[in-house]
Amino acid sequence: MSDLVEVTIGRVGRAHGIRGDVFVDVRTDEPARRFRQGATVAVGEGRKPIELATVKWNRGKLIVSFTGFPDRTAVETLTGELLRVRVPADERPSEPEEYFDRQLVGLAVHDHADRRVGVIAEVLHLPAQDVLRVDTGADDDRLVPFVSALVPVVDLDAGLVRLADVVGLLEDQE
């Protein structure tokens, strides 16, 4: 059995209606996998895990209710709290060419000649595409668009990503 890690899957938003429903700011790439009726989530610090009573989508926004929070007043005490679940550390996304942020952060970054040039410090989810923030050890980090043309190799087992041979990807141009 693999080790478990705790991952953030959302943040409780504002209440919706009077029956204890709340909007959730989704923080996972696979909401259908994480948000299911009957699933248990950790909410905030020091609270007991609670069960998702209902899960529904309305105009592209996730709305949930929690067992034990029967009305708007009760559920408003959770506003702003992070929702977390424990998952196997070696769990993979359902699609073969996708990765969880937690799998990428900390991986060594190698250039096209297989020289280590840094480490992935963060995955940024920008409107156009995902971007890797690479800590090169210098004063400034580098941002690398996470697309196969620029990052052709992702080897989780070896603990590294390899960048394409693209001038200016990690160095300043004169």
Image (cartoon, grey):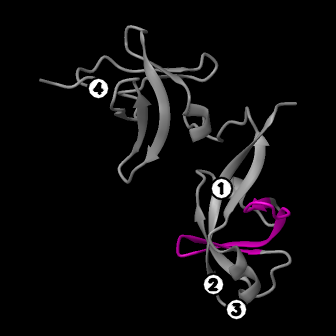
Q: Which is more N-terminal, label 3 or label 4?
A: 3
Q: Position of residue 108 (x, y in %)?
A: 51, 21
> What's the amino acid at mark 3?
Ile
Q: Which is more N-terminal, label 2 or label 4?
A: 2
Q: Inspect the magenta stretch and tell me whether residue 63 lies in it.
A: yes
Residue at 33% across, 29% down:
139
Q: Are marks 1 and 3 in contact (CB under 8 Å)?
A: no
Q: Position of residue 84 (x, y in %)?
A: 72, 55
Find residue 45 and report its image quarter: bottom right
Q: Which residue is mark 3?
A: 18
Find the distance from the CA under tag 4 to the CA under tag 2. 45 Å
Find residue 113 and report its image quarter: top left
Between residues 34 and 13, which one lies in front from this camera angle?
Answer: 13
Q: Which residue is mark 1?
A: 9
Residue found at the far front of this picture: 139
Q: Which residues are magenta?
A: 41-65
> What's the amino acid at mark 1?
Ile
Residue 168 shows up from this direction: yes
* Disc assigned to residue 16: 2
Q: Is residue 71 above or below residue 133?
A: below
Q: Inspect the magenta stretch and tell me whether residue 61 lies in it.
A: yes
Crowd around label 3: few <14 · some 14–19 · many ≥20 (10 Å):
few
Residue at 71% across, 53% down:
33
Residue 38 shows up from this direction: no
Crowd around label 2: few <14 · some 14–19 · many ≥20 (10 Å):
some
Q: Is residue 64 above or below residue 129?
A: below
Q: Is residue 150 left or right of residue 154?
A: left
Q: Which residue is mark 4?
A: 169
Q: Quadrant of the C terminus?
A: top left
Find residue 79 and report its image quarter: bottom right
Q: Which is more N-terminal, label 3 or label 1?
A: 1
> What's the amino acid at mark 2?
His
